[in-house]
Image: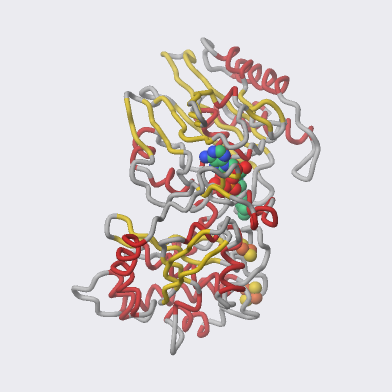
Amino acid sequence: MKMNLKFICNNNLVETEVQPGKSLLDFIRRDLRLTGSKEGCREGDCGACTVLVGDLENDRMIYKTVNSCIMPVGDINGKHLVTIEGLSYEKLNQIQNDFVEQGASQCGFCTPGFIVSLCGYFLENEKPNINDAINSLDGNVCRCTGYESIRNAINNSIVNLGSNEHHGKSHTEKLVSSNFIPNYFLEIPQRLNNLSLEIQTDSGNGEAKQIIGGGTDLLVQRWEEIEDADVNLIFHSQLENKITLENNICKIKATVTVTEFCESEIIKKYFPGVTESLYLFGSLPIRNRATLGGNIINASPIADMTSILLALNAKLVIKSKSIKTIKLSEFYTGYKTMNLSPGELLAEIKIDLPKKGALFNFEKISRRTYLDIASVNSSIYLEMNENAISNVHISAGGVAPIPLYLFKTEEFLIGKEISFDVIKKAAEIALEEITPISDARGSAEYKSLLLRNLLFAHFEKFFPNLIVVEELI
Ligand SMILES: Cc1cc2nc3c(=O)[nH]c(=O)nc-3n(C[C@H](O)[C@H](O)[C@H](O)COP(=O)(O)OP(=O)(O)OC[C@H]3O[C@@H](n4cnc5c(N)ncnc54)[C@H](O)[C@@H]3O)c2cc1C
Ligand code: FES
Ligand code: FES
């Protein structure tokens, strides 16, 4: 079913009818005829298609980088879409000039993606620095220039921005007067506000059985089918009330993205350490769209958020005509099968607040450090009473057809004091609970070894004076 779409693309209002599940990149290149955004991998891996999606939050524009190849076009309704064409008009902008001066673009295929990501970084960061700017490019790959000249160009942009006189200007005015973005950006908040009064931004067809969260799995795996399907778009970019606290229970809407989870003050305060390693989840544009609900329902045995939520002993609130609550550890029934009927919606994830002094750790081994899914991952939540373990939950990913909760290992560990022998025995029990298979991510033996070492790594991190991994191996 087609939907009416109204949004601002660069400096222009766009009004049209579309199939909402179509890839935003196809719409940009084929319908809008803006061909600066490139199609490289079409899988969210290369960043050549990166665009900015801007939304008003509390009267302030928030811009996020996304991979347009795997974003459904329906989700752009009521937003400000910025493509490379919208970042400079008569002349190159300062970031582009710096790329030219430093020879940071050779064939140029990746360059629009880099420039868009950097503009997004400068829009969102009033005090830019080179390390954070480079981290914001974790989803952009260049195959021919070499990263040193790109790094030098970014350095120059930071220096150029800092050297201009900006007394009394807003951050956006400062970027405009420094030629980082065009003038029209100043009017976007007002224009978007007017637009929001005209349209209904909830573009989901609640009746449709095909639910799409961020689309970062679906538009990779089944984009041709999704393009014409009747879809229920549930992605919401407003964080308000998405993560709340009630009676010592943290309630997280399933549409919360990995970025929102990491940035939430509630998560930072009550779950310290949980988000520490989530920079290893995909890339920034992927984290900006990947929802927690999508991670759970996609049911990949190596899903990172699911690993973390298993160790936090999360419960799922599922809605159809009635509401049911089920423990995540009891949700999966086999490879990609679960206690969920077609059209049923995962609405919320509930986690008990950790006890005071509780420990948490997440470990992930992948073939590449960045932008790679795990070969094996594992998370642990641990409560101690004096020297003995009073509560523990451990997950193991990549070693079974489902994201696994280690029930027997938990049973063994409860009440035990931490020692070399106990941890070794726990690892032996864990290896009896798993059923790894050999595939492109490693042999079954290798994955068993990885899990054993990750379990040791958890305890070494918590008890460095008692447990030394080298001595356990
Ligand atoms: C380049 C790249 C890198 C990635 N890296 C990682 C990584 O490091 N770690 C990792 O774990 N994953 C990774 N992923 C996978 C993906 O980003 C995650 O699984 C993500 O959390 C999926 O969420 P989504 O909202 O995009 O799901 P979608 O693609 O929208 O949906 C996935 C499935 O869930 C269903 N669904 C979504 N939300 C709901 C809901 N609320 N109720 C019922 N059904 C629902 C959909 O119908 C679909 O079947 C990566 C993907 C890409 C493309
Ligand atoms: S085309 Fe490679 S990330 Fe979109
Ligand atoms: S300039 Fe050729 S891929 Fe980056």
Q: Which residue is at a point 24% across and 76% down the rendered structure image?
A: 166
Q: How is the image coloured?
A: secondary structure
> Of 441 and 221, which appears nearest the observer?
221
In the rendered image, residue 361, in percent from the top left (x then y), is placed at 51, 33
In the current view of this chain or complex, which residue is farthest to the bottom?
90
The C terminus lies in which quarter of the figure? top right
In the current view of this chain or complex, which residue is farthest to the left?
168
In the rendered image, residue 444, in percent from the top left (x then y), is placed at 79, 34
Question: In this orientation, does residue 40 appear?
Answer: yes
In the rendered image, residue 89, in percent from the top left (x then y), is placed at 44, 85
Q: Does 65 sit above or below residue 383?
A: below
In the rendered image, residue 291, in percent from the top left (x then y), is placed at 51, 45
- Locate ligand 1 by image quadrant: top right
Question: In this orientation, does residue 293 appear?
Answer: no
| Total marks placed | 0
Q: Does 20 sit above or below residue 49?
A: above
The N terminus lies in which quarter of the figure? bottom right
Residue 8 sits in which quadrant? bottom left
Q: Which residue is at a point 37% across and 43% down the rendered structure image?
A: 264
> Of 396 and 145, which appears nearest the observer?
396
> Of 301 and 127, which appears nearest the observer?
301
Q: Which residue is at a point 39% across and 73% down the rendered structure image?
A: 158
Q: Please give left or right for residue 145 compared with residue 130 in the image.
A: right
In the current view of this chain or complex, which residue is farthest to the top?
415
Q: Does 435 sit above or below residue 225?
A: above
> Of 80 and 380, which appears nearest the observer?
80
Q: Which residue is at a point 43% across and 77% down the rendered structure image?
A: 156
Q: Please give left or right for residue 58 compared with residue 89 in the image.
A: left
